[in-house]
Image: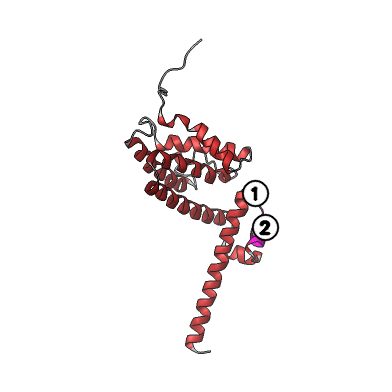
Amino acid sequence: MGADSAAGAGRRLRADAQRNRDAILSAAREVFAEEGVLAPLDAIAVRAGVGNATLYRNFPTREDLLSAVMEASIREAVTDGEGLARTREPGEALIEWLVHLTWLLRIWHDLPYCLADAHMDQNSPIAPSTATLIAQTHVLLERAQAIGAARSDIAAGEIFELVTAVSWAVDRFGDDEQAARRRVLLATAGLAGGGVDIEAPPRVG
């Protein structure tokens, strides 16, 4: 085999390997969304059209696969958030982002580490992931606050905690996307203020 032929074979092998990896990631995202992050890895291999050996060669552990899926999902989510900032009115962009974020987070509640407090625990394996999502929330929140479309006395971390709770309900009750949207809109109805004093002391008696 000549040098050119060998180089071509190498390129084909690398392309094939990349296609297998991409197919596994795509299948994993679908299976995790449908069955949760504890779904059998064998089912992911079957959907990807690869053997188990190929799956484990690319992702030796479930943790490795989860990490890759989360990274890809977050990259896409941030891109979507940036698109919302460019194309939507600030208040609408923020709400649409929270709907999107809730739908993303719904499959993370079966993780072997707590999603609810990951953004406050720097030792959490998913702290960098939640930090990225909170940072994008902050960008959209600031835009909405600047035009009075969101109240000024709330922070991105608080909103993230809220949508985390809502995403648990979405997962727990098996909401479809329409039901999830309704749940998010109900939960965030006070985001714009509406005369509600969130600092008021509780009434006694």
Q: Quadrant of residue 19?
A: bottom right
Check the image and report above or below for 34 versus 158.
below
Q: Can you name the residue that lies furthest to the left here?
A: 146
Q: Main secondary structure of the magenta part?
A: helix
Q: Looking at the picture, how far across and down is residue 143, in whole percent?
A: 35, 40
Magenta segment range? Answer: 35-47
Q: Looking at the image, which residue is at 62% across and 48% down? A: 36
Q: Looking at the image, which residue is at 47% across and 50% down? A: 77
Circles 2, 1 touching at the beta carbon (< 8 Å): yes
Which of the two residues, 65 or 44, is positioned nearer the viewer here? 44
Q: Looking at the picture, how far across and down is residue 184, in whole percent?
A: 52, 36
Q: Looking at the picture, how far across and down is residue 110, in whole percent?
A: 60, 44
Circle 1 residue: 35
Q: Looking at the image, which residue is at 59% across and 56% down? A: 28
- Amino acid found under the numbered disc labelled 1: Glu
Q: Is residue 66 visible?
A: yes
Q: Is residue 38 visible?
A: no
Circle 1: element type: helix
Q: Looking at the picture, how far across and down is residue 60, in whole percent?
A: 58, 61
Q: How many marks?
A: 2
Query: Residue 43, which numbered label?
Result: 2
